[in-house]
Amino acid sequence: MKRYLLLLMAAFALAYTACSKESGIDGNTDPEDSTSTPPNTKKDSIVSYSSVQFALLPGSETYGRVFSTIKGKVYTDNVPDSIGKYLDLAFINFGSSSMFFASVNDPSFDLKLPGVTTTLVRNTVPDSVLAVSAFDTLSHAATLNKQTIATDDGSFASTDLPVLILFQNGYGKKGVIKVKSMGLETITADIKVVY
């Protein structure tokens, strides 16, 4: 009898969690797979990903160019089609003086993956909007939630680093990227996203 009660409670908890996701851009809801949902999910919480490396060039078998805020992972160019619904950001490099982040379904991005949603990306963020120096102490979702995010045609150069990029994924979650450095094969960034 206890076994059935535990199974019933687990099923109820899963059903409640699946039905309580927020709607995002165009009414999208978070993907069904919540196994990698970050552990700290208070209403005013931010999840941080540190030293995320993005490949400067396509085709790297070591470093990727697409990132999932839900999985907290960068994927190489041979990403499985089933992962498309989790992907939020693509890094695009047209040389050290023209780099930017975009939605994975942006026409300028060379990978075409099924199931991706549109992410709004603001590559030009002046200090008056959000200062680079404020990134490290950013710990409340309210700071990001008040930001207006619309896709721009901005880009950054390696000489501009560090820079901030704001985004809002297809599920309505806002975030910020701090691009810290550029190496021979990668750029390195810290990412914070509201959950």
Image (spheres, rainbow, N blue to C red):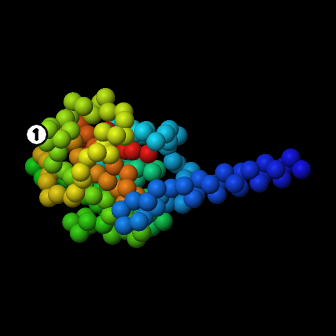
The quarter of the image holding the C terminus is top left
Where is 83 relative to 112, above or below?
above
Image location (x, y in percent) of residue 31: 49, 60
Front in this rendered view, residue 62 or 44? 44
Query: Is residue 64 among the parts visible in the rendering?
Result: no
Dot 1: element: helix
Q: Residue at x 43, y 38 (%)?
A: 45
Q: Which residue is drawn at 41% across and 65% down?
A: 27
Residue at which label 1 appears: 159
Q: Which residue is drawn at 36% across and 67% down?
A: 26
Query: Is residue 126 among the parts visible in the rendering?
Result: yes
Front in this rendered view, residue 181 or 120? 120
Q: Which residue is drawn at 39% across and 59% down?
A: 24
How many tags in the picture? Answer: 1
Image location (x, y in percent) of residue 42: 49, 39
Would you say 78 lies left or right of 137 here? right
Quadrant of res 19 = bottom right
Image location (x, y in percent) of residue 191: 33, 42
Amino acid marked by disc 1? Thr
Would you say 187 lies left or right of 156 here? right
Quadrant of res 91 = bottom left
Image location (x, y in percent) of residue 171: 40, 58
Would you say 176 lies left or right of 162 here? right
